Image: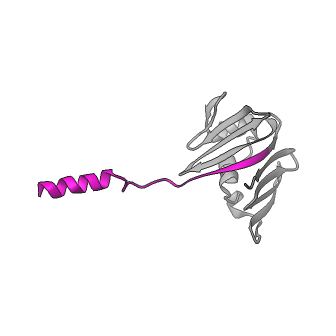
Amino acid sequence: MKKLLIIMMLFFMSGCAVKQIQKSEAVAVVWKTQNIKFVGTGFLKYSGSTIELSIYSAGTPILAMKLGKNVCIETKGCLSYKSFNKRFLLPIYPDRLLYHILIGKPLFHGENLRKTQRGFEQEVMGKNFDIIYRFNLNEIYFKDRKNKNLIKIRKLNG
């Protein structure tokens, strides 16, 4: 009985734990908002419910961001999603907007969602915004025409 208990403990401790799926993609990024403007290349990494975005321009790191329960930016510290929107996007956006954009989740409860062959598109207009959002296998595209905000992430093949 004692041997069985030891074997069971070793079995559970040696790799039978739930492993998180990890995926890393090389990306080209254009980010233009009132408070953040850059163009660069880098990596978008998915690990469980955490997303990391690292961007470089001419080999120099210009952004290291981790999204999970909060948004953590290497040089700015961690912020709630609401505070992040207020400081870097727009306070009128839904709290987890950036997270949903990066994981490919429809915005605004799927309002005006149109499925495409490789993903989906949305056009959502409100009093304070005019958003085009596309997510497919090769590109993430978010543009608020009214507020001139653009986040474009193109996956680099090879």
- Does the magenta segment cover residue 24? yes
Q: Residue at x 72, y 54 (%)?
A: 158
Q: Nearer the viewer, residue 86 or 23?
A: 23
User: Residue 82 lies in what quarter of the image?
Assistant: top right
Q: In which quadrant of the rendered image does the N terminus lie? A: bottom left
Q: Is residue 55 above or below residue 103?
A: above
Residue drawn 17% across the image and 58% down it? 4
Q: Is residue 2 left or right of residue 75?
A: left
For residue 4, above or below residue 149 = below
Percent x, y for residue 144?
83, 49
Which residue is the extreme one toward the left? 1
Query: Does residue 141 show up?
Result: yes
Residue situated in front as seen by the camera: 115 or 110: 115
Q: What colour scheme does the image use?
A: one colour
At x 83% / y 51%, what residue is drawn?
143
Residue 117 x %, y %: 76, 72
Q: How many marks?
A: 0
Give residue 100's position: percent from left, percent from top.
66, 53
Above or below, 98 relative to 18 = above
- Picture quadrant where residue 39 is located: top right
Residue 35's x, y, as percent? Answer: 80, 33
Quadrant in which residue 18 is drawn: bottom left
In this rendered view, identify the residue nearer to me: 21 or 3: 3
Q: Which residues are magenta?
A: 1-29
Q: Residue furthest bottom?
A: 117
Which residue lies at the image location 78% right of the left edge and 45% below the top edge? Answer: 29
Q: Which residue ends up furthest to the top in the rendered image?
A: 75
